[in-house]
Amino acid sequence: MHVTSLDHINIRTTDLERLRAFYTEVLDLEVGERPPFGSRGLWLYADGKPIVHASVSDKHASGDTLPLDHVAFAATGLKTLTARLTKAGIDFEVFDVPGRNMRQLFVKDPDGIKVELNFTEAPDLSD
């Protein structure tokens, strides 16, 4: 057995609509099929894969894994994303990774989870 990639993250939120708007309107994920669990929630998809699972909670559960430092995704379209974040008034930081052809953008989602987006395509590495 070996891990090959990130399967999904699960976020508990008090405001499902706010979370949906961030991940769909800012990060271009799509709402997709979710099994009929007994709780309210949604699954957000990238390239046909449900990578963000969200459920409604009025508070974080005791014994949970917080603090979560960040969640990382591979991405393309750095300039488009920075323009979208700037227009929405959402703070972010962009860094060049030393010794690698990679740029990282860090942003927090509406529930305070740090999201890292890694860009390695040539158009995203030029100024």
Image: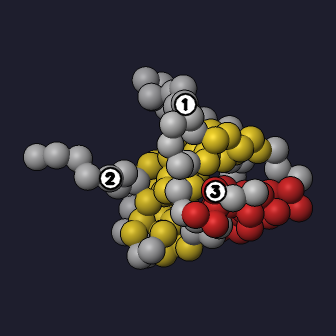
Looking at the image, residue 62 lies above or below residue 22: above
Helix or strand or loop: what does disc 2 sit on?
loop
User: How many residues crowd around disc 1 within 10 Å: few (fewer than 14), some, or many (20 or more)?
Assistant: few
Q: Nearer the viewer, mark 1 or mark 3?
A: 3
Q: Is residue 42 left or right of residue 35?
A: right
How far apart, in angstroms, are the residues tagged by discs 3 and 2?
A: 23 Å
Please name the residue shown 26% across and 52% down the image. Answer: 4
Q: Is residue 96 left or right of residue 3?
A: right
User: How many residues crowd around disc 2 within 10 Å: few (fewer than 14), some, or many (20 or more)?
Assistant: few
Helix or strand or loop: what does disc 1 sit on?
loop
Residue 99, percent from left and from top: 51, 37
Helix or strand or loop: what does disc 3 sit on?
helix
Q: Which residue is mark 2?
A: 5
- Among the two numbered marks 2 and 1 on one chain, the one whose residue lies closer to the N terminus: 2
Amino acid type at image mark 3? Leu
Viewer-proximal residue, 124 or 91? 124
Q: Which residue is mark 3?
A: 125
Amino acid type at image mark 1? Asp
Viewer-proximal residue, 120 or 69? 120
How far apart, in angstroms, are the residues tagged by discs 1 and 3?
A: 25 Å
Please name the residue shown 42% across and 65% down the image. Answer: 50
Instruction: Examine the rendering and report whether any part of residue 97 can be seen.
Output: yes
How many badges with numbers are in the image?
3
Looking at the image, residue 109 lies above or below residue 39: above
Residue 61, percent from left and from top: 50, 32
Residue 101, percent from left and from top: 53, 49
Q: Which residue is mark 1?
A: 69
* Residue farthest along the left direction in this orientation: 1
Amino acid type at image mark 2? Ser
